[in-house]
Image (tube, grey):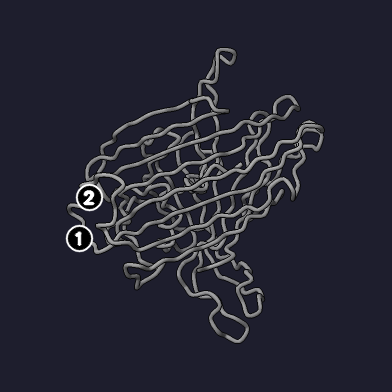
């Protein structure tokens, strides 16, 4: 069901002559995450960031974070609930811990020479004074196994991947280039009958100082439903690439009840920028098996609500960012303080008559 970068995409599609109308598909995308919506956050767009993820990186530095996802039919926190609809009975679709298995999300962050970038032409590099670029690559996969209408079995492997190149934090993590693709199994329930469809999306963004170009395409069951190439005016340093948002938020320190907003080019809107808000909701402790001999250690985090603002906003996402180093029982360091993303919630929607299947809860499982 996941379709990449961690966010809700909205795409208006013309399916066929029988439907005679436009339908709104919400495509879950981890690699394009963090446009999860419905956030009532407010705040001034101010693109200044710390280097909280690592204060002393040099060219050649590499970090790989691995997250494991577990299906949860009833996850809730604070005022947010991602519970499975009670209308989704086993007669319609069986949803249990075998429906989504082997869910993995991997983020690799590298520090590369700026002259190593050769994927596109960008005049940002002509004026950029930094010594390096930050390359953030993500991969996602999950095995899907649906039993529909008591008899029909659907199996699939949903996948997504992305890569984005950024300037340093002193240049507002300004994006230079990003590319993403995803494949997702969409569940629809209408009149107590369940069906699935295959969604595939592709995007490529090339940024210059005063404009950026967005190439986007989408397929539903192999049929092309969207294909665009548009150029938009902007000023370099004003926006955050969607594929980089979860990384960038490692460098945003928000006290509880404070918020910030950002402009993000969104695949769902053919690459046009949309406002996204981030609000710090509460301090939370999350146990992770990073201690001595695999013992749990409690990691202190801030819970962030992330979402688009405006109409067609959808449901907010929750992400939990580390706020201080985690200690073992003997007071030794189990996890360094690098503002890691510790947990995030990936929403599993149902299209048609119902709301949600529940969610995938991803916890940090390895740092390399």
Res. 150 image quadrant: top right
Q: In this image, 159 relative to 165: left or right?
A: right
Q: State which tag comes first along the sequence, 1 or 2.
A: 2
Number of residues whose C-alpha sits closer than 10 Å to that of mark 1, classed few (under 14), some (14–19) or many (20 or more) = few
Res. 67 image quadrant: bottom right
Q: In this image, 300 relative to 171: left or right?
A: right
Residue marked by disc 1: 129
Residue at image position (67%, 54%) is 70
Residue 38 visible in image:
no
Q: Is residue 46 above or below residue 24?
A: below
Label 1, label 2: how far apart the Cα atoms are: 10 Å
Residue marked by disc 2: 124
Residue at image position (71%, 42%) is 145
Q: Is residue 86 above or below residue 80?
A: above
Q: Position of residue 100 (x, y in %)?
A: 68, 47
Residue at image position (48%, 63%) is 64
Q: Position of residue 73 (x, y in %)?
A: 71, 48
Q: In the rendering, which numbered label is found on residue 49? A: none
Q: Position of residue 19 (x, y in %)?
A: 58, 16
Asked if marks 1 and 2 touch (Cβ < 8 Å), the reply is no
Q: Secondary structure at mark 1?
A: loop
In depth, the one of 51 and 16 nearer the eye is: 16
- Furthest residue to the left? 127
In depth, the one of 360 and 356 nearer the eye is: 360
């Amino acid at each position: 069901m996941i379709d990449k970068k961690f966010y809700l995409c909205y795409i208006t599609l013309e399916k066929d002559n029988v439907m005679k109308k436009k339908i709104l598909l919400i495509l879950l995308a981890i690699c394009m995450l963090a446009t999860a919506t419905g956030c009532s956050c407010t705040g001034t767009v101010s693109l200044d960031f710390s280097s909280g993820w690592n204060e002393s990186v040099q060219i050649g530095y590499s970090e790989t974070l691995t997250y494991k996802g577990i299906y949860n039919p009833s996850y809730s926190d604070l005022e947010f609930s991602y519970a499975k609809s009670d209308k989704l009975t086993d007669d319609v679709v069986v949803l249990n811990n075998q429906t989504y298995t082997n869910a993995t999300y991997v983020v690799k962050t590298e520090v590369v020479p700026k002259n190593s970038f050769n994927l596109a032409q960008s005049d940002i590099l002509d004026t950029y004074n930094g010594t390096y670029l930050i390359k953030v690559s993500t991969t996602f996969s999950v095995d899907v196994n649906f039993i529909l209408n008591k008899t029909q079995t659907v199996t699939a492997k949903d996948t997504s991947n992305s890569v984005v190149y950024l300037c340093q934090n002193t240049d507002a993590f300004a994006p230079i280039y990003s590319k993403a693709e995803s494949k997702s199994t969409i569940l629809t329930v209408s009149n107590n009958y369940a069906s699935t469809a295959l969604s595939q999306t592709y995007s490529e963004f090339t940024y210059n100082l005063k404009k950026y170009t967005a190439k986007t395409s989408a397929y539903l069951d192999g049929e092309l439903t969207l294909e665009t190439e548009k150029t938009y005016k902007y000023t370099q340093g004003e926006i955050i690439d969607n594929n980089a948002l979860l990384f960038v938020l490692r460098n945003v320190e928000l006290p509880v009840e404070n918020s910030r907003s950002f402009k993000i080019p969104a695949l769902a809107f053919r690459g046009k920028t949309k406002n996204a808000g981030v609000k710090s909701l509460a301090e939370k402790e999350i146990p992770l098996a990073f201690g001595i001999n695999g013992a749990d250690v409690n990691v202190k985090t801030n819970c962030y609500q992330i979402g688009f603002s405006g109409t067609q906003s959808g449901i907010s996402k929750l992400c939990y960012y580390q706020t201080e180093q985690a200690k073992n029982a003997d007071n030794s360091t189990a996890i360094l303080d690098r503002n890691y993303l510790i947990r995030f919630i990936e929403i599993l929607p149902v299209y048609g008559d119902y709301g949600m299947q529940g969610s995938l809860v991803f916890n940090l499982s390895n740092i390399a």
